[in-house]
Amino acid sequence: TMTIHNEEHIVDVHVRSGVYSSDTIFDYTHGYIATRLFSRNACFIMKIKKELIPELQEIGHLAFERETMKDVYSPNNVWAQFQPGNSRLGNFKDWILYGKHIENLCTGLPLYQ
């Protein structure tokens, strides 16, 4: 499921698929995406690259398009492959940088950038 919070410039994406379940937050205000993978008990954070990641308004259109058409090819599909290296627990400075929504998602988990 996807929830778009236009007033906060946040998109929440929840994937419920057993071992592949995850929650992802696109925080356009702070410019970061965080994905919490439940099977790995970890948070992966990446900077939003405007040339690769659809803008907030476009995500809503793509989601609507995909739901109504069920299987639409779009050149704007976003795939990311994380190659975790060193992890660390978030601290006060991280949460200022990433924002409260990502803090709520990732607090207490190892962070990978």
Image (cartoon, rainbow, N blue to C red):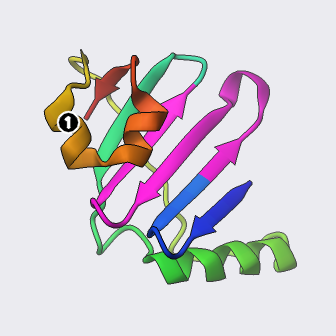
In the rendering, at what x and y percent does residue 7 appear? 49, 75
Magenta run includes residue 28: yes
Residue for point 28% across, 61% down: 31
Horizontal side, residue 58 vs residue 43: left or right: right
Q: Is residue 7 visible?
A: yes
Total marks drawn?
Answer: 1
Where 36 sits versus 7, above or below? above
Residue 12 falls in image quadrant: bottom right
**Quadrant where the N terminus lies?**
bottom right
Residue for point 29% across, 73% down: 50
Q: Residues within 10 Å of mark 1 (few under 14, many from 20)?
A: few
Magenta run includes residue 72: no
SS at circle 1 = helix
- Residue pointed to by mark 1: 94
Which kind of residue does numbered mark 1 sit on?
A: Asp
In the rendering, at what x and y percent does residue 35 appear? 47, 39
In the rendering, at what x and y percent does residue 47 appear? 26, 53
36 or 71, which lies in front? 36
Q: Main secondary structure of the magenta part?
A: strand
